[in-house]
Image: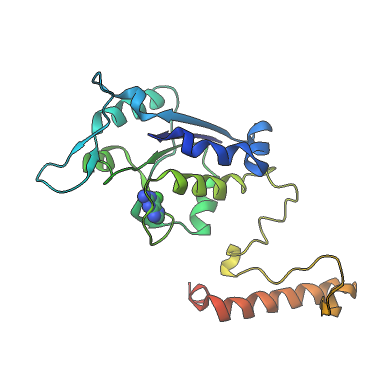
């Protein structure tokens, strides 16, 4: 998979890709991530990428021309399956969306800033608009990092244990069950005895029940999806 990220703040976006699982995925060539500074595609000598709104109103709007130039330069080199715009009024990111996107070959992610982009960018270039939740961030960069993390960890080979992404919370619309490690007892607090029984069918059944109970208690909305 190849991800091209268009941003006015590449430095804000880079560090999540330089540690742990994402770093290893890149080093193992399971994913390529490229950053494009929108200012490099500005047309005037001030490197402007935004301007005031037509019709009046507070806040700057990202202009179509630099974005068009950047996206067109990328599309001249390869085909893209999706051009995703990160915006608080997009579709809310869910595990199912991450699953779908993780199957794509080449994607572009455009990070919104200021008030957002000229509507014509959305009409002409964007195939999918994604939000990471009902709150406003100062830009789409952190949201893009969240989306990338959610999709890259699903690429086969990225997680050491192939089964572990399948047992995440939200796969199958269930939260994950409680988990334990050593010591067996800590300051009087004990690990459930069943987990030492070696009876794996019974342990699996217990985990499924716990996942269901936890979901019913914390996220009943998931059970109706
Ligand atoms: Cl994708 N962008 C911004 N600016 N704020 C957000 C968001 C995105 N998702 C939730 N809040």
In terms of depth relative to the viewer, which is nearer, 26 or 11? 11
Instruction: Point out the residue furthest to the top here.
Output: 45
Residue at 87% over, 72% down: 184
Q: Is residue 66 above or below residue 15?
A: above
Q: Is residue 159 above or below residue 23?
A: below
Let me know if residue 130 appears in the view: no
Residue at 46% over, 46% down: 142
Where residue 190 appears, x then y in whole percent? 83, 78
Q: Is residue 211 above or below residue 181?
A: below
Instruction: Point out the residue furthest to the front here.
Output: 187
Q: Is residue 112 above or below residue 171?
A: above
Rendered image quadrant of residue 199: bottom right
Residue at 36% over, 56% down: 136
Q: How many marks?
A: 0
Determine whether, in the image, residue 88 is placed left or right of residue 27. left
Where residue 94 appears, x then y in whole percent? 49, 59
In terms of depth relative to the viewer, which is nearer, 188 or 92? 188
In terms of depth relative to the viewer, which is nearer, 51 or 76? 51
Where residue 149 appears, x then y in whole percent? 56, 47
Where residue 8 appears, x then y in whole percent? 37, 34
Let me know if residue 125 appears in the view: yes
Determine whether, in the image, residue 88 is placed left or right of residue 54. right
Determine whether, in the image, residue 145 is placed left or right of residue 67. right
Residue at 50% over, 48% down: 147
Rendered image quadrant of residue 50: top left
In terms of depth relative to the viewer, which is nearer, 208 or 117? 117
Quadrant holding the N terminus: top right
Describe the colour scheme in one phrase: rainbow
């Amino acid at each position: 998979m190849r991800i091209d990220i268009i941003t006015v703040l590449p430095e804000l976006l880079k560090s999540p890709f330089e540690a742990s699982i994402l770093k290893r995925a890149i080093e193992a060539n399971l994913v390529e991530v490229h950053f494009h500074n929108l200012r490099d595609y500005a047309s005037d000598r001030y490197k402007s990428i935004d301007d005031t709104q037509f019709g009046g109103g507070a806040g700057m709007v990202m202009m179509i021309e630099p974005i068009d130039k950047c996206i067109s330069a990328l599309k001249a080199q390869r085909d893209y399956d999706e051009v995703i715009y990160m915006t608080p009024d997009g579709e809310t990111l869910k595990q199912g969306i991450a699953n779908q996107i993780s199957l794509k070959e080449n994607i572009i992610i455009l990070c919104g800033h200021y008030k957002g982009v000229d509507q014509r960018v959305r009409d002409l270039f964007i195939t999918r608009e994604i939000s990471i939740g009902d709150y406003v961030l100062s830009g789409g960069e952190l949201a893009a990092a969240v989306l990338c993390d959610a999709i890259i960890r699903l690429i086969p080979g990225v997680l050491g244990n192939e089964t572990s992404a399948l047992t995440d919370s939200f796969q199958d619309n269930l939260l994950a069950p409680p988990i334990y490690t050593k010591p067996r007892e800590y300051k009087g607090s004990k690990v459930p005895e069943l987990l030492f029984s070696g009876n794996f069918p019974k342990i699996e059944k217990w985990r499924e029940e716990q996942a269901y109970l936890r979901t019913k208690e914390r996220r009943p909305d998931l059970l109706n999806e």
